[in-house]
Amino acid sequence: MNISYDSRIDKIYQYLLIALAFIMPLTVAGGNLIVGIIVIIWFLSGNYQIKISQIINNRLAIASVLFFSAHVIGLIWTEDMLWGLHVVKKMWYFLLLLPILITIVKKEGIRYYISAFLLAMMLTELLSYLVWFEMIPNFKNATVENPTPFMSHISYNPFLAFTFYLISHEAIFNKKLKNVQKYMYGFFALTITVNMFITGGRAGQVAFFIIASILIFQLYGKNLKALLFSILMILGVFFTAYNNSALFSERFDRIEREISNYDNFKGTSIGLRLTFAIHSWEIIKNNIFIGVGTGDFPNEYKKINMSKTPQLANARNPHNMYTLILTQLGLFGLFALLYIFYAQFRIAAVSKSKFLKDVGIILPILFLIIMWSDSYLLGHYTTLLFVFFSSFLYKDFEKP
């Protein structure tokens, strides 16, 4: 394959990656279409020896393939092969997409990827506000009560938290920005903060407080000033949101009410998550090392649920990524999952770029937090967010 052909292919990749960054928060079908085109071009464009070498020499790519492989191995002892194959199918991003993206992302393309993503989030946020102010009618997922346009609040708020960090980091640490640009980024960060608390994603809201606190420590260092600022920021934002957002205050009050009166609220959002955890532990403690198999969570959960809480619907997902992995694959699977995050932290720690180091630490922290409340590496939007940003945050651009 000649150099000019390689150059044309690379240019096509970069356009597709920019388009993917923009489409990612907006549409499942569009994202899948672009991902499919990238994968097809990658397999048809040759240079397999170079591509495989790049994958083998990247710690995160290996961790990603191992995580996928753990699910395939878990099919050996699963009884429900059909559901097991369904789970394996949903994990294909970790076998193909992340390793493939690592081989095609370019360091000089990062600012374009992120700019396209931020532009899409700005559009999403604008539509959210237009619905909230009743300037346009409800559409898709967006309602006046919970204005999340293109995805559910479960996914939307983690996107907002990550976007807040990206623009805040840029405003604070990019010395090349002019004052006008800094003010624009600051305004964007402020509108995202408000948008965070007029929508209902509690996992994203918790992640927001932690991420914002880390940003303060990155600015001031590990000292008392940073700690005090973090505490004041959390208290200030929390009480402002609690007193001005009916949705936020209602959902926060519901947490305390439903946990303290669990027996009366087993069928609610919080109650069900507690029930999932309690029943799942019964599965885990009897299958601690290798789990029940990739496809057996629904059947095993059904047995316990019918015995202890027959009035509640059965579940195919415990809405906790750690619990899901432990029930399916035991400690063996949990190690494979956590090794991905270990690889991310290790790579970020030695990065020479402050941006790649700081954001490379935030991405795994974000997911380690939100995965307590849902299986975020199974959902399309959040999995694609994780995989796409991982592909360039943890690539060694010095290697050929």
Image (spheres, rainbow, N blue to C red):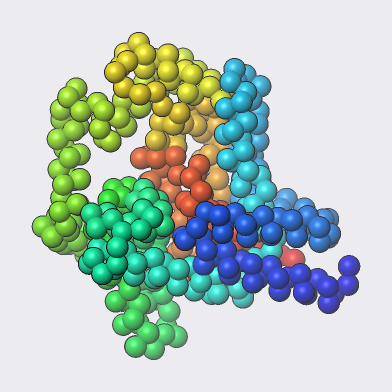
**Residue at x 44%, y 35% (from the top left corner):** 322
| Image coordinates for residue 215, horizontal then vertical, percent | 34, 64
Q: Is residue 225 visible?
A: no
**Residue at x 55%, y 54% (from the top left corner):** 29
| Image coordinates for residue 253, horizontal then vertical, percent | 15, 43
- Judge from the rendering whether residue 208 lies leftward or rightward of residue 42; answer left or right: left
**Residue at x 61%, y 47% (from the top left corner):** 93
Q: Quadrant of the C terminus?
A: bottom right
Residue furthest right as drawn: 1
Residue furthest top as drawn: 307
Residue nearer the viewer, 213 or 89: 89
Q: Quadrant of the N terminus?
A: bottom right
Residue 36: which quarter of the image?
bottom right
Residue nearer the viewer, 274 or 316: 316
- The vertical placement of 341 against 85, above or below, is below
- The vertical placement of 262 against 210, above or below, is above
